Image (spheres, helix red, strand yellow):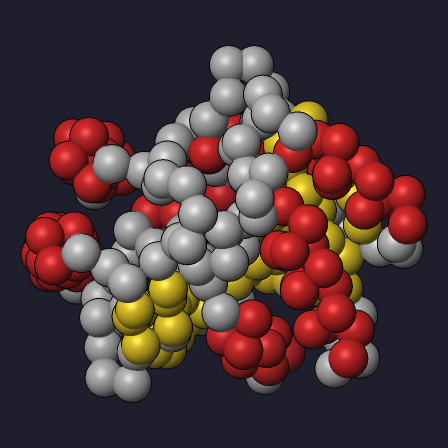
Amino acid sequence: MKTSLIIPFKNEVEYAETTMTTAYGYLSEREIEFELVAVDDSSDGTWDILKSFESLHQNVVAVRGDDPPGYGKALQKGFSVATGDIIIPFNGDLSDSLDDVISYIHLIEDGYEMVFGSRFMAGAKVTDSTAVKGFLSQLGNAFFQILFRTNCSDITNSFKAYRRMVLEEINPTANGYNIGMEIALKGILKKYKYTTIPVAWSGRKYGRSKMSIIKSIPMYLSTALRIR
């Protein structure tokens, strides 16, 4: 099965080349059938880096995001051009683990339709995260886990894997960081076969995160209530 890694970028000139080179090399070395789909919402030099990388490598697609930009909109754009059987959003700052990408692929190939990663279960490894951010994220995810009676303790995490048909049937519409929650909850309610595994997450070394936990809380609550 072919895997499409959807990588959104927004003003990541410090990360763009490193992220693309690292992901491309890692998957190539393991003889994975893959493509990298980079979606750019930047106003700095990120786009030039991505287009240069695309011109030098096979199985790489770089596209511009829509205006006005949004994390969810970027993923939707990536989903629309991806050609893989397995679709995996992957953060452009390398906060997600490529080792976990391999685990996702194997689980989808074993028959799961969705695979979720959790930063809050035994075996997970989180580095360089602030205590407040981690506490609020874990508390909010515990609430959603109870509300929807799922076995996923990190429903807001966008780092998940899906069979193509899941995304085609759900047709996500969220424009922000709530897109991961939207897809997961709709998939659970549709009773797609899924599992949750512990994943590694590391904080960024350069720049500032584009996501604010405090600002995202109302958006997540609204999404959960609308789907519920």
Could you tell me if residue 111 is visible in this image? no
Q: In the rendered view, does 199 fall on the left or right side of 62?
A: left
Q: In the rendered view, does 28 fall on the left or right side of 173?
A: right
Residue found 66% across the figure and 29% down from its top: 45
Q: Position of residue 145 (x, y in %)?
A: 17, 60
Camera-side residue: 188 or 196?
196
Q: Position of residue 98 (x, y in %)?
A: 56, 71
Q: In the rendered view, does 206 fall on the left or right side of 225?
A: right
Identify the image quadrant of the N terminus.
bottom right
Residue found 44% across the figure and 47% down from its top: 206
Count of number-bearing discs: 0
Q: Quadrant of residue 165?
A: bottom right
Camera-side residue: 197 or 128?
128
Could you tell me if residue 131 is visible in this image? yes
Residue found 79% across the figure and 73% down from its top: 28
Q: Quadrant of residue 223?
A: top left
Q: In the rendered view, does 86 fall on the left or right side of 218?
A: right
Residue found 63% across the figure and 46% down from its top: 16
Identify the image quadrant of the C terminus.
top left
Q: Is residue 17 above or below residue 31?
A: above
Q: Is residue 85 above or below residue 199?
A: above
Q: Position of residue 104 (x, y in %)?
A: 53, 74
Q: Residue furthest top?
A: 68
